[in-house]
Image (cartoon, grey):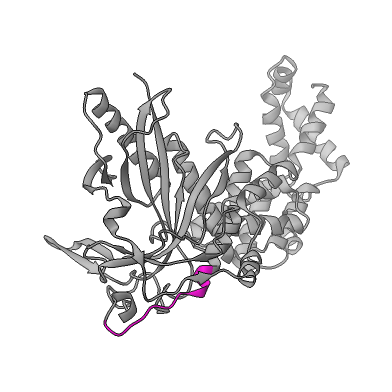
């Protein structure tokens, strides 16, 4: 019997506000454990929560970006469960009246060649984060760090529209690109700014009824989403083929062993005993709030990718690589706006710029070579003033020392030889000095042409334009 998988993701997005969602306390990643917990987050006697307005704005911006249903009013509820990293014994969340209802996120097909996929969004709601259990700080004990408690989260729940682990990982990437483009989260997976729970079931091919599902908690990388789902799908199929039944449960993914393991039984909504939070009034969404959120809407990654392909002639691969990071896309756009050829600019940003940034462990937003300088450099390649190899030398000098493109070219003697008469003379000398290779070339050994080009380049100390040299050699030798 053949099976197919049905997958839905719950993506937790830590919102990039300067303070927590109900306490207003400052928050920063990496502080010593429990130094940023505050009385409101801990639910101590005499404290009352107040909603973070910026978190509301960010949720509305996300809702507009996915063409979601925006609630005229949303309400906060208490989600009751007992776990060491939940100091109040409940989590403030949204249940019956989430701020964002149904919407759609469009992503490219996994293979990059098919039609874009529209993935349904069931809802997106605001809630506070819990603390963090630390299992490796004390031998045989678990520590609790409550710094993260109260951090504002937007939980995005997808429809069960995903069918393969690869597609689920691609959707997680699309969501990562979207929230970063909206500037509502830095999306840092290593710091927990974005993480994912994956719900998966399998069913016989050709049937429509959903099988029993399991939930895989706290996946924090695109690769782990794919690997965990692949293992879990195979496990469920093995259970069913052996005559067993899949149990509804929450599981953890062990990346070292590449396996999922049971964590606890999966709760249903009734188990959480939701009820309206008595300390928080419903939030009415006004037209002013909507306009403020709409003002923060940028060009979305899906639209940017389409523009790069349709208007600038980039490949699908290049469009994805550039558009999925807002800072990289901004640098590329500014380079093109400064007059650079789009394809050349794309190649430079993805290749030498990216490699140099990686080598210096620097983000592109801190790149010392401005988009305008890169555009000037590309223009000098386009007009034949310098070779691609020399251009990398110029870029590195701009990075280390700053300065002007033309000034560096002249100071380092990198400008290409363009005098056709002088080049023709050197080409004639190379032909005369290599009679055996010329004979081989005329006999059909076309690779010899590259050798002759190299000899001319050596004679000109690399200052000749290889394309011009190639053309002159072909003309002088009468070869195609």
Q: Position of residue 391 (x, y in %)?
A: 68, 52
Q: In terms of image quadrants, where is residue 410?
A: bottom right
Answer above or below: position of 81 versus 254: below
Q: Position of residue 468 (x, y in %)?
A: 80, 38
**Count of numbered tags:** 0
Q: Which of 313 and 284 is in front in this view?
A: 284
Q: Position of residue 406 (x, y in %)?
A: 76, 61
Q: Which residue is drawn at 68% across and 35% down?
A: 454
Q: Where is residue 463 in the image (x, y as percent from the top left)?
A: 74, 47
Answer above or below: position of 65 versus 343: below
- Residue 87 relative to residue 187: left or right: left
Q: Nearer the viewer, residue 297 or 411?
A: 297
Could one spot residue 143 in this view of the protein?
Answer: yes
Q: Residue at x 56, y 59 (%)?
A: 70
Q: Which residue is drawn at 66% across and 24% down?
A: 447
Query: Which range is magenta?
Result: 45-56
- Residue 290 relative to residue 203: left or right: right
Q: Which of 466 and 5 is in front in this view?
A: 5
Q: In terms of image quadrants, where is residue 334?
A: bottom right
Quadrant of the frame with the C terminus: top right
Q: Residue pushed farthest right? A: 421
Q: Residue pushed farthest left? A: 140
- Residue 138 relative to residue 360: left or right: left
Q: Residue pushed farthest top? A: 443
Could one spot residue 387 in this view of the protein?
Answer: no
- Residue 396 relative to residue 196: left or right: right
């Amino acid at each position: 019997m053949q099976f197919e998988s049905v997958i839905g993701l719950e993506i937790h997005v830590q919102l990039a506000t300067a303070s927590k969602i109900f306490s207003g306390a400052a928050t920063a990643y990496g502080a010593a454990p429990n130094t940023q917990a505050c009385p409101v987050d801990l639910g101590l006697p005499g404290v009352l929560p107040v909603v973070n307005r910026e978190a509301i704005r960010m949720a509305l911006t996300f809702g507009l970006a996915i063409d979601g249903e925006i609630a005229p009013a949303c309400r906060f509820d208490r989600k009751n469960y007992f776990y060491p990293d939940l100091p109040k014994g409940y989590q403030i969340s949204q249940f019956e009246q989430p701020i964002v209802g149904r919407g759609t996120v469009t992503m490219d097909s996994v293979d990059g060649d098919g039609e874009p996929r529209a993935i349904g969004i069931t809802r997106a709601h605001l809630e506070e984060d819990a603390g963090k259990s630390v299992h490796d700080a004390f031998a045989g004990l678990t520590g609790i760090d409550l710094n993260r408690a109260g951090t504002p989260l937007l939980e995005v729940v997808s429809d069960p529209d995903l069918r393969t682990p690869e597609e689920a990982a691609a959707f997680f990437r699309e969501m990562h690109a979207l929230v970063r483009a909206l500037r509502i989260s830095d999306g840092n997976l290593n710091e927990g700014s974005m993480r994912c729970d994956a719900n998966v079931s399998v069913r016989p091919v050709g049937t429509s009824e959903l099988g029993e599902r399991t939930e895989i908690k706290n996946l924090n990388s695109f690769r782990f989403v794919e690997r965990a789902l692949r293992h879990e799908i195979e496990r469920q199929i093995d259970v069913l083929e052996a005559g067993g039944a899949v149990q509804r449960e929450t599981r953890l993914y062990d990346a070292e062993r590449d396996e999922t393991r049971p964590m606890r039984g999966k709760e249903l909504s009734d188990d959480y005993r939701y009820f309206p939070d008595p300390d928080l009034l419903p939030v009415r969404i006004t037209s002013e709030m909507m306009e403020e959120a709409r003002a923060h809407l940028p060009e979305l990654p899906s639209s940017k990718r389409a523009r790069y392909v349709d208007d600038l002639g980039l490949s699908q691969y290049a469009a994805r690589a550039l558009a999925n990071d807002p800072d990289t896309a901004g640098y590329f756009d500014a380079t093109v706006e400064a007059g650079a050829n789009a394809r050349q600019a794309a190649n430079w940003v993805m290749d030498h710029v990216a490699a140099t940034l990686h080598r210096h462990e620097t983000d592109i937003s801190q790149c010392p070579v401005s988009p305008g300088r890169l555009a000037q450099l590309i223009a000098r390649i386009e007009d034949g003033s310098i070779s691609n190899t020399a251009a990398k030398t110029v870029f590195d000098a701009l990075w280390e020392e700053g300065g002007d493109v033309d000034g560096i070219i002249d100071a380092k003697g990198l400008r290409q030889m363009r005098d056709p008469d002088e080049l023709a003379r050197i080409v004639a000398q190379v032909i005369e000095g290599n009679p055996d290779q010329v004979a081989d070339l005329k006999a059909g050994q076309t690779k010899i042409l590259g050798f002759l080009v190299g000899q001319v380049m050596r004679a000109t100390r690399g200052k000749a334009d290889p394309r011009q040299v190639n053309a002159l050699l072909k003309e002088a030798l009468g070869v195609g």
